[in-house]
Image (cartoon, rainbow, N blue to C red):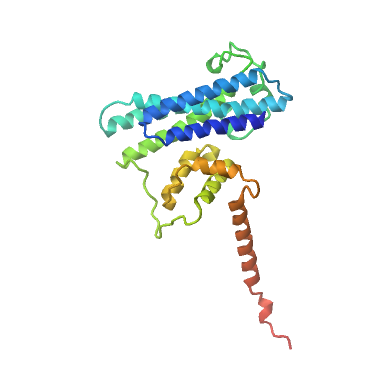
Amino acid sequence: MNTFTERFYNAMENQLNEVSLNTLIETEQLKESIKICKKAMAKLKKYISSHSFETVEEEINFFKEGKPRFYAKYIYFINVYNFLIQMPLGGDEILKDYITYELTDLKRFFDHNQAFYQYYRSDSSQMDEIYFTRGGFDVHVELENFEEDDLYSTSHDYKLSKIIANEKYQEYLNLELQKIIHHDDQPQEIGIDLPLTWTFNKTDLVELIYSLVALGVFNNGNSEIKSVVSFFQTAFHVDLGSYYHKYTDITRRKKERTSFLDKLKFALLRRMDDKFDMAVSPQQFIKFE
């Protein structure tokens, strides 16, 4: 189940990456992205309808980790699309008010779901069997976040999807607000005395980026590959082009699938060993008569 869900999610991500690289205006890109997510969600639901979970743990994992990843993407794209098409005409102050209203609305959502939000953010698991298995809730109580299919829904998987999506939407809104404040379409550059340029193989950088995102080191694990790639390209003055194709090449390696990460580990160990060997012990200066 986990292998299928991960493979299916990666296929959806590749399609979304292709859309992000075309020349369509942002709203058209979002419409295409929404369609891709919707199709992926329908196929995922069809697969699950013919699949029996072998254990409770497998069921929890799907409804807590698998399904929300797909639905969160879908909800996020819809949020951004609606934000753009409903954006009022006017100057900076009007746009600030519009974004501030959206941020306030998000705060109300998080406040309203504070208990479960804290449960999610603290990586708790004691209530997982209640929150993320089917049949353990009253449909009439959970109408606000129920998908109307008790064979494909739990009491909190949709709510979790909304939380993940709204966190990313909140990040998007804050970036848009900063653009207005600084009167610049690009985030402010960090002052660096000596510009850094990536001079290694581009595939090596892609390997590094995907490993960092996989570990969840940015934004509490809620960063997107596209955003991280964009940051690294700007920071290191490099164009990664069709980076998802490079990632696909990495996954197809027969040997040394993480060759660059292996080189990094070896180089760091060698540096630490060299520093240790070069360290001079005080006893070396003692003259024994």
In-image side of 238 versus 94 (left or right): right
- Left or right: residue 288 versus residue 117 is right
Residue depicted at x 66% and y 74%: 281
Viewer-nearest residue: 193 or 106 = 193
User: Does residue 218 show up?
Assistant: no
Q: Position of residue 24 (x, y in %)?
A: 37, 31
Q: Quadrant of the N terminus?
A: top right
Q: Is residue 20 above or below residue 186?
A: above
Residue 156 sits in which quadrant? top right
Q: Is residue 270 left or right of residue 178?
A: right
Decide if residue 3 is in sight here: yes
Find residue 149 and report its horizontal and vertical position in percent: 59, 14
User: Quick check: 30 above or below 178?
Assistant: above
Which residue is found at the position 64% from the left and 23% from the top? 131
Q: How many marks?
A: 0
For the point 49% across and 32% down, the residue is: 15
Residue 257 vertical position relative to residue 106 in the rendered view, above or below: below
Looking at this view, is 77 or 138 the one in front? 77
